[in-house]
Amino acid sequence: DGTLLATAQDGRFPHVRLWDWASGRCIAMLRASATPPSKAEGSAAPKDKPVIAMAFDPEDAGFMAVTRGRRSNYVACSWQLERSAPKQPIECTLKARHTLECDVRCLEHSPFGPQQFVTCGAENIRFWRIKDGHLHSRPVALGPHAENTFTAIAFESVYADDPQGRRVFFG
């Protein structure tokens, strides 16, 4: 709804912080990989990798972040954000967590529907949706562009007189 700002930090246990834009207060903190260290690991746990990308889903008050995992893979986490009243803390419920085998450089919410995101990276573009607590993806057939590394995503505005004119641009 335009009232939140998200920041990510690097370190042993990276976090995403959600801030109230107007007041500048931190109102929620999410563990970026959504996997707490085990008791055996404790403070000696290996350093998690930083958050690579994150995006809000304005249609269903959701938020998604992608981080590097401990084994050089990627981890995507999606949360439902709920606030009982304005200026109150946000309750964050993990909706889905998925280990990705594809490279991710950018993540954006897809305006094509709620709980849909798009990622891109080295040699891949994927459309994601969250359904029944799971992340599902569909890769884009890249043809002659299969060896490219994609680093940015942009959606063209949809005009009322051309509802089928939705396009996605990658760079």
Image (tube, helix red, strand yellow):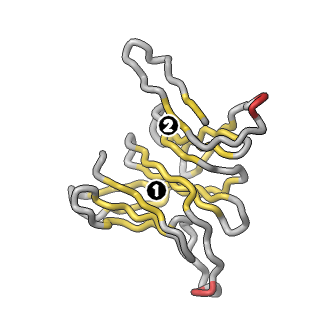
How far apart are labels 1 and 2 at the CA level? 16 Å
Q: Position of residue 152 (x, y in %)?
A: 57, 41
User: Which residue in the protein does label 1 denote?
Assistant: 79
Q: Nearer the viewer, mark 1 or mark 2?
A: 2
Residue pictured at 51% horizontal, 34% vertical: 154
Between 128 and 102, the residue placed more toward the observer is: 102
Question: Dot 1 lies on which element?
Answer: strand
The amino acid at mark 2 is Ser
> Which circle's residue, 1 or 2, is located before the other in the chain?
1
Judged left or right of residue 156, residue 139 is right
Q: Give left or right: position of 133 versus 120.
A: left
| Labels 1 and 2 touching (C-beta < 8 A) | no
Percent position of residue 2, x then y = 30, 46
- For image coordinates 40% across by 57% down, the residue present is 6
Foreground residue, 130 or 11?
A: 11
**Left or right, residue 117 beside residue 18:** right
> Dividing the picture into quarters, in which one does residue 77 lie?
bottom right
Q: Examine the rendered structure and indicate whether residue 51 appears above or below residue 124.
A: below
**Looking at the image, residue 93 lies above or below residue 38:** above
Q: Where on the picture, by quarter, is residue 74?
A: bottom right
Residue 15 versus residue 75 in the image, above or below: below
- Looking at the rendered image, the quarter that the N terminus falls into is top left
x 42%, y 54%: residue? 80
* Residue designated by label 2: 110
Residue occupying image coordinates x 22% and y 56%: 22
Of the numbered discs in the image, which one, if any, rests on residue 134? none
Q: Is label 2 in a helix, a strand or a loop?
A: loop
